[in-house]
Image (cartoon, grey):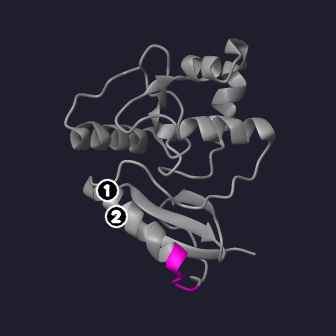
Amino acid sequence: MFNYSYYNSPVGDLEIRYDEHFIYAFLFRNEGYSKKEEGPQTKLIMEAHHQLQAYFDGTLKQFNLPLQFEGTDFQKKVWTELTKIDFGKTISYLQMARQLGDEKSIRAAASANGKNPFAIVVPCHRVIGTDGSLTGYAGELWRKQWLLDHEAKTSGTYLKLF
């Protein structure tokens, strides 16, 4: 059973699912969604809110929270790989497949990327099309663009595609 907390970010509300030990999801919520009753403001959830605020303030470049990945072994492998993409950088889906050890796994890697339950924290927004396009983002492309622009501006460099 999860507890719920909500964080109002510049790219919309995030629903955070957690228990006393782990965070299970950071999910974008669009206008009109039904909020669940918020759980206790534990040390863990206060730290999650603090790190999100620091990210949006431009002072945090890497999240450090106890995440509980729930998915297939391949999905977990993809999500772990996503955490290795540096702040303000991007890679292509093809590059990700190669880093996973099989160029032919590009579609499976893209699918797992799209099922990432940790918006922003596990930076799937940093994966783009081979041609530099912002293909695919479960949180909508305008958010992906905003997050990439934020990271480029915050890091003081132009967005480096691959």
Give the extent of the magenta segment.
Answer: 40-44
Q: Is residue 24 left or right of residue 42?
A: right
Q: Label 1, on which residue?
A: 56
| Marks 2 and 1 in Cβ contact (< 8 Å) | yes
Which one is nearer the viewer's eye here, 119 or 19?
19
Look at the magenta stretch and give its main secondary structure.
loop
For image coordinates 38% across by 69% down, the residue present is 50
Q: Is residue 87 above or below residue 105?
A: below
For image coordinates 64% across by 21% down, the residue present is 97
Q: Label 2, on which residue?
A: 53
Residue 49 seen:
yes
Q: Is residue 14 left or right of residue 39?
A: left
For image coordinates 72% across by 20% down, the residue present is 105
Residue 10 seen:
no
For image coordinates 33% across by 43% down, the residue present is 146
Is 42 colored magenta in this rendering?
yes
Q: Amino acid at mark 2?
A: Gln
Is 59 colored magenta in this rendering?
no
Which one is nearer the viewer's eye here, 12 or 102?
102
Q: Quadrant of residue 55?
A: bottom left
Q: Where's the C terminus, which quadrant?
A: top left
